[in-house]
Image: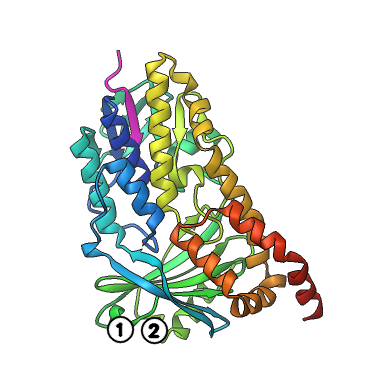
Amino acid sequence: MFDFDIIVIGAGPAGSAAATWAAKGGARVALVDKATFPRNKLCGGLFTERSRAYYREIFGQDFDLSRAVTRHDITFCHAGQEVATLTDIPPLHLTMRLDLDATLFGHALDAGAVDYTGHAISQLTETKITFKNGNSISAPILIGADGVNSIVAKHLFGTAFDTKTIGFGLEIEVPETTQTPANLPVRIDFGAAVWGYGWSFPKKGSTTVGVGGLRAPNPDMKSHMRHYVQSLGFDPDAIKVKGHHLPFGDFRKTPGRDNVLLAGDAAGLVDPITGEGIAFAMKSGQIAAQAALDALAADAPKTALDRHQSGLRDMHRNLRIARTLRRIIFAPRWQKTFTATFRRSGTVRMMYMRLLAGELEYPELARSVVARLPRYLLNSLCG
């Protein structure tokens, strides 16, 4: 009696991954987005080796790196001073979301998903969405992969996120005519915002520069951004600044309700330390799609959420550990001690890099931190 088996709302990395996996699994899938592709998206665009592995698994092919900038070095700073420059690190791929998202969307269509992009939603229920043009489609399972401002999350919970715990970021694209990205390092600045950091990521044709952190302790993020942009030698008045919320580890313990699931940023699945969200978005989209396929196979759509939560268990565990470690790395009272330890300890630096590159999981990092914690505390008390 339904038009489709699964409706996926949002065609970014989470939604395109979900639609692709579900369509490959034999489901009739509608892929909905208010935008048409290609479209711009605010994001650092870091595509790690973890993202690359998930990409292969979900889309059945390797990621085309020809339009990305791949680096094997990175510079870390604090208060404008270099803390460390690491070379021969695991590869970091810097992408433009305009290209990345269009590619993933194309894979979803190739897998058999039906294109409903360019259609804004006016109403939705647990099994039906109505577009602003008056048309509607239905399915026994909905997957909300529509970003941090998710209308699906608003429908389920009243709000898309908690303003007390959400993050916020500001970002600019510095054109190549201003400074050649090929000559710039990949750079992360601890403390550029309270409970956050700044970043400068060279891309093909531009450099993405941004500042992000928890929203509540940063009431004047624009001031942090202006100072950071100036510190990099750019004119803060010459380039338009755009802002967006960041679900920094503020993941939803219950990512949906019965037959309605949330994935990616809509479920708050962003690393609270590195800010990386593309890998978690794609993987959570795949997990949501598999949960939907299994629920449909059992003729029990309302069991989809339980299956989805079970699939997300390891990801949630990693994010809980990361949220705890964030207190050591980003809390203002620990900042100087952490950066001093980071400068001194090659082990800490390499573990952070392996984490950023997607080669290390948080339980292993946590064990190392706990082993070093007494000395860490002593240093902070004596400093």
Disc sitting over residue 239 in the figure: none
Q: Which residues are magenta?
A: 1-8
Taking the spot 45% from the left edge, 28% from the top edge, the residue there is 260
Tell me if I can see residue 127 in this picture: no
Residue ID for mark 1 = 179
Q: Farthest residue to the left: give it.
A: 110
Looking at the image, residue 302 lies above or below residue 132: above
Disc sitting over residue 234 in the figure: 2
Provide the secondary structure element on which disc 2 rests. loop
Quadrant that contains the C terminus = bottom right
Provide the secondary structure element on which disc 1 rests. loop
Taking the spot 38% from the left edge, 57% from the top edge, the residue there is 49
Q: Residues within 10 Å of mark 1 (few under 14, many from 20)?
A: some
Location of residue 375 in the rendering, given as x and y in whole percent from the top left corner: 76, 71
Location of residue 358 in the rendering, given as x and y in whole percent from the top left corner: 45, 57
Taking the spot 81% from the left edge, 80% from the top edge, the residue there is 382
* Amino acid carrying mark 1 in the image: Gln
- Does the magenta-highlighted stretch encompass residue 120? no
Looking at the image, residue 374 lies above or below residue 114: below
Location of residue 153 in the rendering, given as x and y in whole percent from the top left corner: 49, 38
Tell me if I can see residue 324 in this picture: yes
Looking at the image, residue 83 lies above or below residue 1: below
Q: Nearer the viewer, residue 162 or 335?
A: 335
**Discs 2, 1 touching: Cβ within 8 Å:** yes
